[in-house]
Amino acid sequence: MDIKKFKERLAEGSAVYGPFMKTGDAAFVECAGHAGFDFCILDMEHGPIDFFTLQNLIRGAEAAGILPVVRTYDSSETAIGKALDIGAKGIQVPQIQSAAQAREAVKAAKFYPQGERGVCRFVRAADYSSTPRDEYFAKANEALIILQVEGKQVINHLDEIFDVEGLDILFIGPYDLSQSLGVPGQVSHPSVLEAITNISSQAKKAGVVTGVFCDTPEAAAMWKQAGIQYISYSVDVGIFTDACRNIVSSLKSF
């Protein structure tokens, strides 16, 4: 799926689904695409992958028709710019705590006049300089900007973040949110569910698309019904572990 079609789906009000991926093997990314997921989040914050590996995972995503989003390891210009240089179609920036941070992330992800991203045409995203420069700069500025809010302290600044120009999706990280609310890991705790619901409701009123992580079909259905459109469903290693556990359980029942 390309960025244009992806954004059209969101504009229509449709939900899109994709797993976090910590794998270093592009075959798993291809499997996710062939299975029908819309996007994958290649995780540099909590995953072990480096940039050299990352570019091969992006190639795998492109081969299988799944949109490659990179969760950067932080909000620095280097982390954001490198991910985009090697072909990420979107960046998901963690630990956004304020509108000022949000604006800096957008600025690092976009070329002039929307931002101040470091300029180099001799990168994979520009087909190593074979893409005409004006075409490349315009196309590059269409990349998805997903900002991840994860602490209760940011809730009081949501209106300011919603106003940040260039923001495509506001992603709610339930695990870090649960920790900031004093119930670490309890993502189904009433206080966590209430906070996510309130954030998504405020975002909807502001015309901002929201996203969330979940790891059960029931939670995915609940958040879709609540109007959340960008739904990250589980993690590749967790999906594989669950599948293995189910197979072993079946084998041992013979």
Image (cartoon, grey):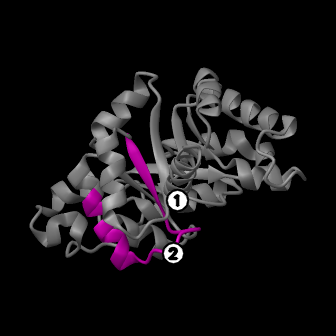
Report the amino acid beneath label 2. Answer: Pro
Q: Position of residue 17 (x, y in %)?
A: 46, 38
Residue labelled with disc 1: 237
Q: Up-down: is 44 above or below 36?
A: below
Residue at horizontal 48 percent and vertical 42 percent from the top: 168
Q: Is residue 50 magenta?
A: yes
Q: Quadrant of the N terminus?
A: top left
Q: Up-down: is 144 above or below 83?
A: above
Q: Is residue 125 magenta?
A: no
The span from disc 1 to disc 2 (Cα, nearest Å) is 12 Å
Residue at horizontal 73 percent and vertical 52 percent from the top: 175
Residue at horizontal 39 percent and vertical 45 percent from the top: 39
Q: Up-down: is 38 above or below 110?
A: above
Q: Magenta stretch?
A: 38-60
Report the amino acid beneath label 1. Answer: Val
Q: Position of residue 169 (x, y in %)?
A: 52, 42
Describe the element under mark 1 as helix, strand or loop: helix
Residue 166, visible in the rendered structure: no
Residue labelled with disc 2: 48
Q: Position of residue 193 (x, y in %)?
A: 78, 35
Describe the element under mark 2 as helix, strand or loop: loop
* Depth check, front residue: 202 or 42: 42
* Depth check, front residue: 189 or 69: 189
Circle 1: is it few (<14), some (14-19), or many (20+) Cα within 10 Å?
some
Residue at horizontal 54 percent and vertical 72 percent from the top: 76
Q: Position of residue 213 (x, y in %)?
A: 61, 44
Image-based side of 40 in relation to 208, left or right: left
* Depth check, front residue: 232 or 124: 232
